[in-house]
Image (cartoon, rainbow, N blue to C red):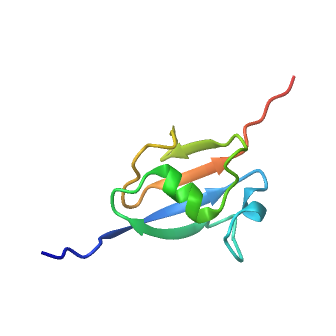
Amino acid sequence: MFYPKVSITVKIKLYSGLDRQSNIANYDPESGVDLKISKGAKLKKVLHILGLPKHEPLACFINGKKAVANQKVNDQDVIFFMKPVSGG
């Protein structure tokens, strides 16, 4: 039996210059961008779709909570990506 793929929509917000490193054209930092992905996808799939650097450390948050690459994303999640900062 064939089951059609179900897709979900997540909101992507990019900070720390990641918008210039991503595959997103005409990114608006105020509103972010909606991304359709397959249901059950993990955060690492979102990173791959966006074309964000694999070997550069990134801070990832889903709905304001720290997230890891193998965490599943859900419909209507808001996902923030930024480069970690430090200083003194």
Name the foreground residue: 2 vs 5.
Answer: 2
Apparent side of residue 84 relative to residue 3 in the rendered image (left or right): right
User: Residue 64: image x %, image y %?
Assistant: 52, 43
Judged from this view, the residue extending furthest toward the front is: 1
Residue 48, horizontal then vertical, whole percent:
58, 59
Which residue is drawn at the image coordinates 51% and 43% (left, top)?
A: 69
Going by the image, does 7 lie left or right of 56? Answer: left
* Of 52 and 78, the residue lying toward us: 52
Nearer to us in this view, 72 or 63: 72
- Residue at position x 67%, y 57% in the image: 52
Residue 58 versus residue 6 in the image, above or below: above
Q: Residue 84 appears in which quarter of the rendering?
A: top right
Q: Is residue 30 above or below residue 74?
A: below
Q: Where in the figure is residue 60, as x and y percent of width and height?
A: 58, 44
**Residue at (41% x, 52% y) in the render:** 73
Above or below, comparing residue 24 to residue 56 in the picture: below
| The C terminus, quarter of image | top right
